[in-house]
Amino acid sequence: MTMMISKKSNKYLPLADISPNWPGVKVCVTRTGFDDPAFDTGPYGFNLGTHVGDRPDDVVNRRGVVQHEMGAPVVWLNQVHGCHVFDAKHASDADSSKTAPPQADASISVSSDVALAVMTADCLPVVFVALSRDGKPLGVAAAHAGWRGLHAGVLQASVKSLSQACMVPSTQIKAWMGPAIGPESFEVGAEVFQAFVQQNASAAICFKLVNSLHDGQSKYLADIYALARLALSELGDGNIEGGGQDTLTDSRWFSHRRGQQQGSPSGRFATLIRLLPEHDA
């Protein structure tokens, strides 16, 4: 783990050292800050969400620190657990407080002029890079995938949009899965299990039946990472990286479920990606 300092704001930026090593691309994942005693977190930590009860000015200031670290305006989304993909090519001032964020759960960019972001607190963040045949990065994408978005096809939609924008086959796209709720923590109802299995029978291996019953209904443990790998199977196993985190049990990450259990609001951390200018790559 690393603690980055922004020269512009002189504020700490807690970043996790777990990003993929993709030449020509910058990926950052923010932390809560609660896990580091040197960081003055306040009640919400390094929260980047505007909808969790935090002071708006504090969120704006933190987003400014993140933008400075990324080196370009950040495209923040109004995430709705759907599968719409926003094309950031027209986002000239994406982080302005005067500009309403686009309603989407994924975004793509073939330009280094912007950075893309998704916010999560148990849902799965996934970033993508499209590569030329000789390995040059051509474009990037970021997706927010809760179980509803996964079922709706947000990851497949992200791959399709990036593939079309960069004019490459899906096998020339790499994906990296950021921190999400782990397979031993993500308890769901039978309706979630049935929804995925009815869509794709192979999804059954991504669930484990819980022995106990709740209100007469069976409960399952869902492996959101395995569900994502299934959704991204067209990329090939070698092009899918990341996973293995658990936001519920790891204090580095915000967790909506942990907040519910503790009776306290949960912030949102961000996973960001930017296509770097050629002279910086």
Image (tube, helix red, strand yellow):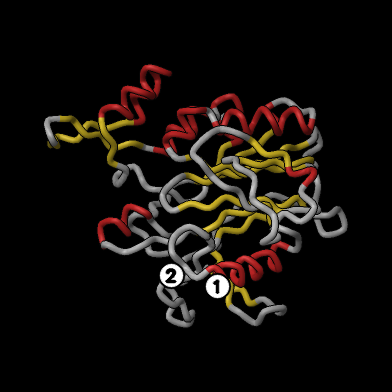
Q: How many marks?
A: 2
**Amino acid at the residue labelled 1:** Asp
Residue at 43% in and 80% down: 37
**Within the image, what quadrant is residue 9 found in?**
bottom right
| Outermost residue, front side | 98
Find numbered disc 2 in the image and state the secondary structure of the residue it sits on.
loop
**Image mark for residue 48:** none
Whether residue 136 is situated above or below residue 93 in the rendered picture = above
- Give 218 or 104, whichever is nearer the viewer: 104
Whether residue 47 is situated above or below residue 156 in the rendered picture = below
Q: Answer with mark 1 or mark 2, whichever residue precedes in sequence.
A: 2
Mark 1 crowdedness (10 Å alpha carbons): few <14, some 14-19, many ≥20: some
Residue 215 rendering spot, x and y as whole percentages: 13, 35
Residue at 64% in and 55% down: 27
Residue 274 rendering spot, x and y as whole percentages: 71, 52
Reading the image, the residue beneath label 1 is 58
- Quadrant including the C terminus: bottom right
Query: Distance from label 1 to label 2 (Cα)?
Result: 10 Å
Mark 2 crowdedness (10 Å alpha carbons): few <14, some 14-19, many ≥20: many
Whether residue 105 is situated above or below residue 230 in the rendered picture = below
Find numbered disc 1 in the image and state the secondary structure of the residue it sits on.
helix
Reading the image, the residue beneath label 2 is 44
Residue at 61% in and 73% down: 4
Is residue 2 shown to the viewer in this render? no
Q: CB under 8 Å between callouts 1 and 2? A: yes
